[in-house]
Image: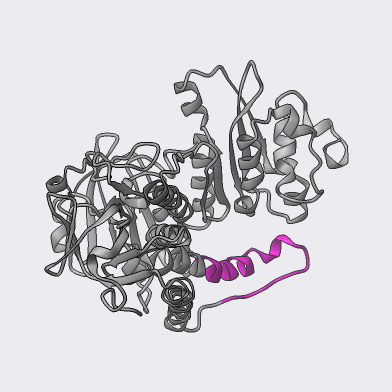
Amino acid sequence: MKDCCESKKPAGYDLLVIGAGSAGFSAAITAAETGANVLIIGHGTIGGTCVNVGCVPSKAMIRAVEVLHNARVATRFNGITARGEITDWAALVRQKQGLVDDLRAAKYTDILPNYPNVDYMAGAAEFNSDGSITVDGQRFSAAKTLIATGSRPHVPNLDGLADVDWLDSTSALEMEALSASLMVMGGGYIGVELAQIFARAGVAVTLVTRHGLLPAGEPEISAALTEYFAQEGITVLDALAYQSIRQQGDQVVLSAKHNGQPREISADRLLLATGRVPNSDRLALDRAGIDTDARGGIITNAQMQTSRPDVFAAGDVTGRDQFVYMAAYGAKIAALNAVGNAGMTYDNHAMPAVVFSDPQVAGVGLTEAAALKAGHQVVTSVLPLEYVPRALAARDTRGLIKLVADKDSKKLLGAHILAPEGADSIQTAAMAIHGGLTYEQLGAMIFPYLTTVEGLKLAAQTFEKDVAKLSCCAG
């Protein structure tokens, strides 16, 4: 990897990019392709969250333990039994890490030599009052700067936590030995995914949460997923008011209240999955007049510009849409606006989001509650998967599809899927919302038969028809 000072002087850059994850690389490559000279300043492991400790390792482990689950439920097909077991958990973790290392090299480290006008420097950056950057005592300045420093796991302010040897999403996926029991704190997408990984690996999992599973989503999906978790042996305790936590011998004990009544929950280990916070607190942003919100997210306008006009921000550090593809998308817009005054705007109204639970949770657009809050007269359809032929053929009818539409215009406002193959179906709904389709238009489209995505057609027809009375192929 090149040293930044071998090819250019510190003052010779058009764009400084702080952060070497997906957003940072997207910004740097985008700017470089316009002919700009770029310096990436990275702190920590190159590649950021997704490839190192987020998307890649978690999805690799999700797929691995899925094999165990499929063996356990094979009897849903008459005449079939199967068996799966973990023979070497540490070997599985090492295999996962090998994939992480390979992808980090292929998608980050090995990419840099392809861009001679992009330099890389390792170090912690701080802003100066004039907008320049200091890294290890060396000052850098450019016409524009882009902040893409990502996020890190949130640590709740809970009495006694400092005396507990807790895990987070990073350390949990690095454990080479499984404990007998695990308490997962948090019902968001991180908590949901990790709870199911370890439960399927044979750990007794209790998920504790203040607000239930995936509380920002549709309540029908949260309720159904909670039921499916219970069927797999995962205990979900919601509506908890945490009071304190303590290490008691070889157990971690949480003291809480449920409906006003005291309750204690214990497990061998504690895994914190209470969200993520932006990595903005060590950049001396206030020194340069760059504003943040209450959680530390850097505030930007639609052009990804901060309160300081020559500084832009993208990705998790903004505190919104914390998905790797949205980080890359926002960074591309920010870079083009920074080096080319492109005037592009960030648009997330058709942003798909996926939780890789099983069944998978996928959504795009507005929830019913959000549509009502936005002032729409709302109509919805909810289609259980038992009406989707693909689910019947797979002998797995766990899940549902919910569509949200404007009552008067019939325009589709949101789509939400809970299905074993929901992740691969949501993009069709995203394209429908992006194109402004009505549910009538979606229901009239041609879909391939015996696919999960055909459920979107059926759900669209459910607004005005009884799909149980329709013939094959939703005719």
Q: How many marks?
A: 0
Quarter containing the C terminus: top right
Quarter where residue 350 is shown: top right
Question: Is 105 or 10 nearer to us in this picture?
Answer: 10
Residue at 31% x, 69% y is 171
Q: Position of residue 290 (x, y in %)?
A: 21, 43
The reply, left or right, for residue 378 in relation to residue 140 is: right
The answer to whether residue 268 is seen in the rendering is no
- Magenta span covers which residues? 62-84
Q: Is residue 435 depicted above or below 45 in this figure? A: above
Relative height, residue 78 to residue 190 (above, below): below
Residue at coordinates 74% horizontally, 27% vertically from top-left? 440
Name the dominant secondary structure of the magenta segment: helix
Q: Residue at x 74, y 23 (%)?
A: 464
Check if residue 64 falls in the magenta segment.
yes
Lateral position of residue 18 relative to residue 118, left or right: left
- Judge whether residue 366 is colored magenta: no
